[in-house]
Image: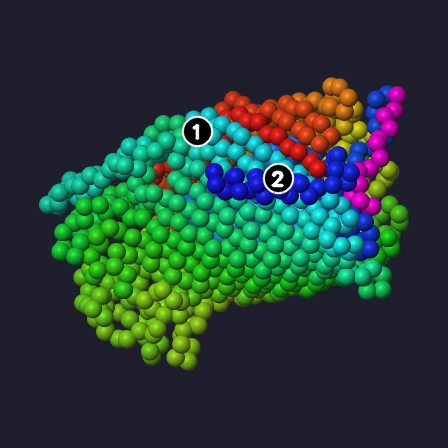
Amino acid sequence: MTNLRALSVVLLASSSLATPALAQTAQPQTTGQSPAPGTNATDVTAPPPPVQQRQDGLVPDQTEIIITATKREENLQNVPISVQAIGTRRLDQLNISNFEQFTHQLPSVTFLTAQPGVTTIYMRGISAAGSGAEGNHSGPLPQVGMYLDEQPITTIGGSLDVHIYDIARIESLSGPQGTLYGASSEAGTIRIITNKPELGVTTGRVDGELNTVAHGGVGGKLEGMINLPISTNVAFRGVAFYQRDAGYIDNISGSRTYYSYAQDAGFDIDPVTVTNAGLEKRNFNDQTTYGGRAALKVDLDDNWTATPTFMYQKTKTHGVFFYDPNLGDLKIDRFRKEPFNDRFWQAALTVQGKIANFDVTYAGAYMDRPNSGMNDYADYTDAYDRLYASYGGLAYFYYQDAAGNQIANPQQFIEFTNHFKKLSQEIRIASPAEKPFRVIAGAFYQRQSNAIHQNYLVDDLAPNLSVNGFPGTLWLTQQKRVDRDYALFGEASYDFTPNLTFTAGGRLFRYDNSLIGFFGFGRDRNGPPFNAAGSSRTGVAACFTEDGSIVRDGTGAAVLPPAVPGSPCTNLGVFDNGAVRPKHADGHGFIHRLNVQWKPRTGIMLYGTWSRGFRPGGINRRGDIGPYNPDYLTNFELGWKTSFGPWRWNGAVYHDKWEKFQFAFLGANSFTEIHNGKDARVNGIETDVSYLRGGLTLNAAASYTDAKTRGNICNVFGDETDDCTEDDDFISAPSGTRLPVTPKFKGSATARYTWPVWADVKAHVQGSVSYQGSAPSSLRTLVQLVGTGDMINPNDPNAQGRIHSSTLVDLFAGLDWPRWNVELFTTNVFDKRNELSRFTACGSCTRALVVVGRPRTIGVRAGMKF
């Protein structure tokens, strides 16, 4: 509570600086872009004049929504791509503060998550999620790009969950956006556009919330914004937030017995039982998020504006956000404390101006994101104790202490850190938007890296069974990954007639992704000593020596110093002139977008698109597996955008071909592997409709997605180019298998009614419903033996089950004064278990773990504008 009190003092102190005469009484629908140099912000962001209601109760047109999806400011209804935009007002009305909440309103967006900050996003069903390998720190690059204003914030390990407050809008761009947004926008792009500083205006707001979660505890948040003029050509805007989300998962009493399988197999081993006594706790998955943003708008002269911004956010969690349905509703048994800290900061600069009558934009950013934590890995120990029973179980295989005795607690746990860094630079030029021939062109560079540390520990593990120099470490991953992207891009549009426009765009790209470091075990139990510690055949034994060869048990050869600090040596890389260099996966190519746009009459726009997107290839962090290649998405799309008085109806139908898609899964030793699969095809339709009449507002959106593989995907240990025609081949996913994660149908609807109560006080009620159908949780649905047709499950890919369907209902009611507002709300009214993900902890694990959204939450929130 100390942080909460401190934040409230700062925000209340800031409010004392406000000048009430300059306060705004409503939040306008702004573009989120800096106003033109030399102009006042109120000239371009003021609310439109009141709409005159006709005698029939209809309004001539709805409020215009300006977006920047095409890197120009344009009316949403004039942009010939499938875009959904959630503006400031709707974000506030829906009480949206994080990624999970706003995706309820975006039917083409789905995701997998294990906990906050570890999320992989999908759009239009383009997903090949394996068995818990998605979002891995060295997994494939994301397929959906995430932007904060002009800067990409997609990292190797997934997307940032940016706290949503004082946001102008969220734009969701479906389908390949590679020509303008690059490699990680193969299936789509999500853009979070912040409100920018306003010149000559002193304004602000403070909002607070208190809530209670069913089956859980009490949480809340405090948020504030202030906009201050510093001089006639400089303005400042600052945002601060603090949020505590109560837990709702209970860690209950649990126990595991080990070595009994070996005893049953005839080995003279005494079973041991491990309990989690002392770790039982109700509502142990609490989360705290705090941080802020700061931005300046500086008019350098009449033509040029600079907008430097800085954002910091930190998230701390305890416990886990999944449960085991076999143990009871929202129950789990964990054997270690599992803290997780995830923070990031980003410094960005956008410079906008004119050269002659051409608009020039520079956007650059540097982001630093370290995270760290600990994971209980008891499920892995459970699985391998069974698998090794015929060898004497874990006690015989490698779980012994320094005296050679079986370990009393053989459970593994993981200490990990990742350190993501990202530098992006883009410069582009755009010709005048009012001309019949328009061009936008630019250059882009990005470098992102991840320092990976994964330490798999066992209490009391013998030093000679540990990784060399790391007592107690059974397995170590210490690697550095660097991904570089270079691109030249452009789009040109020509109006053949006032109602017919053709657009052609392309992106010439090059990528260079590298990986270097160490992975594996220490000594082999039966091998001779190596440097007084020993080595196995997959860890230290595979390290590079001074002559470029690799160590094998018994050689006693000296190894080269580690290329990545914190590792015993290097076994993942390429020997070159007496040193080890990173392994590289590089390539280049060209993607395109062709579009035709037709406006047969006012209020109707039709378009057709043929576009391509891509995702770069990369290096498998398991050194004995080859690199994986890029995959490509070809999109054919027909869409419409219509406005009829109070109605707005947009939609698109599409056919996508996903070629040689990258497929990540947990292979041998539950180690992530990435291969290229076959092709897949996706057919779908997405639509959204809105209605505004008087005080009634209706919004609805829905999508139908039919996504299936084309061709058999062979067993994970085979050649991914094989057609699975040989006897003894395994078919992991037969042709026609549904792509995972995305349901066939997803939709949401919101109704809001506002009416005057007295004087300038208004009341409102609002209800929303969101539905998501069931979906496979993994692409690996079965394993079929070619030749006999037998169904076998060596790793039981069906264990984690399907993601169940769910329907959520939210209700709101409140009062709004010109400067104050108060609201009561209930989300997830019927307390449904909306499943976000299902997974197993390792490749051979069979316990299904289910990640769910928050149970029913009841709360009150209040705000003040000044």
Q: Where is residue 559 in the image (x, y as percent from the top left)?
A: 31, 73
Q: Where is residue 795 in the image (x, y as percent from the top left)?
A: 34, 44
Query: Could you say whether the residue bearing mark 2 is in a helix, strand or loop?
Result: helix
Rendering quarter of residue 248: top left
Q: Which residue is drawn at 35% across and 37% down?
A: 847
From this view, report whether residue 123 is shown above or below residue 821.
Answer: below
**SS majority, magenta:** loop
Inspect the magenta stretch and tell me whether residue 44 lies in it. Answer: yes
Query: Could you say whether the residue bearing mark 1 is in a helix, strand or loop?
Result: loop
Estimate the spatial distance between the alpha carbons at disc 2 and disc 1, rounded to whole Å: 30 Å
Name the residue that disc number 1 marks: 216
Residue 390 is left or right of residue 500, and the answer is left
Q: Position of residue 669 (x, y in %)?
A: 33, 52
Q: How crowded is mark 1: few (under 14 residues within 10 Å), some or many (20 or more)?
A: many
Extent of the magenta region? 42-55
Q: Nearer the viewer, residue 548 or 202?
A: 202
The number of discs equals: 2
Residue 434 is left or right of residue 155, and the answer is right
Name the residue that disc number 2 marks: 12
- Residue 663 can be seen, yes or no: no
* Amino acid type of the residue that numbered disc 2 sits on in the rendered structure: Leu
From this view, report whether residue 334 is shown above or below residue 153.
Answer: above
Q: Which residue is drawn at 20% across and 61% down?
A: 464
Residue 369 is left or right of residue 403, and the answer is right
Residue 13 is left or right of residue 523, and the answer is right
Q: Which of marks 2 and 1 is nearer the N terminus?
A: 2
- Residue 51 can be seen, yes or no: yes
